[in-house]
């Protein structure tokens, strides 16, 4: 879980969805017994949705997944979200309050990273 958290902080997808729609998805426990980490599997993006694995974090309002391109990502069962294949993502500017609200944010090519 620590490796996953560090990779997430270093290379989280610097995009935010537009045209978001409420959805429900099954939640399952991670295969790592002692982490108490819960993962959710769903599909995001358009026009062709892509299956992703999201970590469900009850201590934060941030939902994250790994995206391409990614320099230091951890291994996961599903492919990383391909931002180039979706027209419903946009880069969150470093100056955006959404970006500045998180203490672990950074900037890469004028886009917010978390």
Image: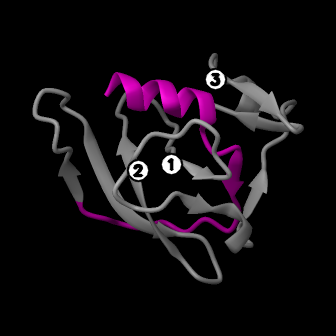
Tag 2 residue: 54
For the residues carrying marks 3 and 2, which lies nearer the camera in this image?
2
Tag 1 residue: 65
Please tell me whether residue 25 belongs to the stretch shown in magenta.
yes
Image quadrant where one finds the N terminus: top left
Depicted 11 relative to depicted 15: above or below:
above
Residue 10 position, x and y percent, is 60, 28
Q: Residue at x 12, y 27 (%)?
A: 34
Q: Are marks 1 and 2 in contact (CB under 8 Å)?
A: yes
Depicted 55 relative to depicted 18: above or below:
above
Tag 3 residue: 102
- Distance from Cα at disc 1 to Cα at disc 2: 5 Å
Check the image and tell me how it is coloured.
Answer: one colour
What residue occupies the far bottom of the structure in this picture?
A: 47
Give the left or right position of residue 91, taking residue 3 as reference. Answer: right
Residue 2 position, x and y percent, is 36, 22
Return the disc, 3 or 2, that comes first in the chain's sequence.
2
Label of residue 50 in the image: none
Secondary structure, mark 3, is loop
Return the disc, 1 or 3, that comes first in the chain's sequence.
1
Q: Residues within 10 Å of mark 1 (few under 14, many from 20)?
A: some
Magenta residue span: 1-26
Residue 85 position, x and y percent, is 68, 73
- Distance from Cα at disc 3 to Cα at disc 2: 18 Å
Give the left or right position of residue 34, taking residue 19 as reference. Answer: left
């Amino acid at each position: 879980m620590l490796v996953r958290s560090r990779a997430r902080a270093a290379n989280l997808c610097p995009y935010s969805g537009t045209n978001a729609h409420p959805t429900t998805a099954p939640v399952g426990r991670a295969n790592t017994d002692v982490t108490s980490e819960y993962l959710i599997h769903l599909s995001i993006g358009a026009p062709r949705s892509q299956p992703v694995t999201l970590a469900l974090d009850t201590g934060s309002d941030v939902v994250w997944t790994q995206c391409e391109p990614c320099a230091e990502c951890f291994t996961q069962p599903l492919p990383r979200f391909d931002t180039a294949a979706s027209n419903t993502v946009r880069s969150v500017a470093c100056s955006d309050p959404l970006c500045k609200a998180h203490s672990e944010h950074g900037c890469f090519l004028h886009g917010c990273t978390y």
